[in-house]
Amino acid sequence: MQPLRSLARDIRSGDSYALVLTLILASLVAGIVAPERTWARIVGDCLFAATVVIAYWTAIARRAFLVPRVILPSAALALVVVGAAEGATTEVTSSVIGAALAVATAVLITRDLLDRRRVDVQTVLGALVLYVLLGFLFAFSFELVGEIGGGPFFSNGDDGTTSDYLYFSLVALSTTGFGDLSPAERAGRALAVLEIVVGQLYLVTVVAVIVTAAMGRQLLDGARRRGSGSD
């Protein structure tokens, strides 16, 4: 029971980004390796919903009245229910809900990290969570374009699966470029280019901010120690 109490305390204090990162990486791996079956879709949606709920509670730990506490958890539950109802036949509605959840969660985490006004382990972990969330957001967007588009999403003639969209999204986000999957239509290509640019700008910006803040904090601490020593 003690580990559960400790976990609950961390979530209430906003210090559980390690758990959020673990959950979102588990969701990513499960989404890529799982077969395209209804039960696999439900498992994947449950993992992502759990990630959203934990991230939500972590991000609003110091903002109890930021938004009603039932909005995102209810939407996460809706994602699971809709995914189970749709099964493996169509993912339009669940893609829209998933993208909305990714955006809302990213906004809450960003506000929480900015409110911290310091760079620590939780800040770095939160920044990593945001990076992976970007991958999920674009994966849901690719899936939506593939479902509503007039032709196959990928140039190999396939519409792709949830696994394909997640895999392609993370490859594009990291600019790895294996070349095994590429979008066939203009909308997909535009989204892919946007993801590549956003991913690179995010890495450059976040790394610069973290390094600058850490160096500034070290300089400030050093100046305080020198000032205390001179007294």
Image (cartoon, helix red, strand yellow):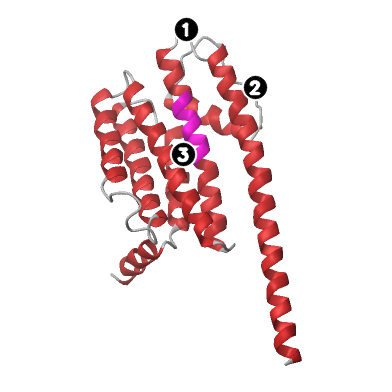
Could you tell me how far apart the alpha carbons at marks 2 and 1 are, in whole angstroms? 20 Å
Q: Main secondary structure of the magenta part?
A: helix
Any part of residue 152 in sight:
yes
The kind of residue on which mark 1 rests is: Gly
Q: Earlier in the sequence, mark 2 or mark 1?
A: 1
Which quadrant of the figure has residue 150? top left
Tell me whether circle 2 and circle 1 mark residues in contact (CB < 8 Å): no
Residue 186 on the magenta segment? no
Q: Is residue 49 above or below residue 37?
A: below
Residue lying at the far bottom of the rendered structure = 231
The kind of residue on which mark 2 rests is: Gly
Residue 139 on the magenta segment? yes
Q: Residues within 10 Å of mark 1 (few under 14, many from 20)?
A: some
Q: Is residue 165 above or below residue 61?
A: above
Could you tell me how far apart the alpha carbons at marks 1 and 3 are, in whole angstroms? 26 Å
Range shown magenta? 133-141
Residue 4 position within the rendered picture, expressed as x and y whole percent measured from the top left: 31, 65
Residue 7 position within the rendered picture, expressed as x and y whole percent measured from the top left: 36, 64
Residue 179, label in figure = 2
Disc 2 on helix, strand or loop?
Answer: loop
* Residue found at x 42% / y 61%: 14
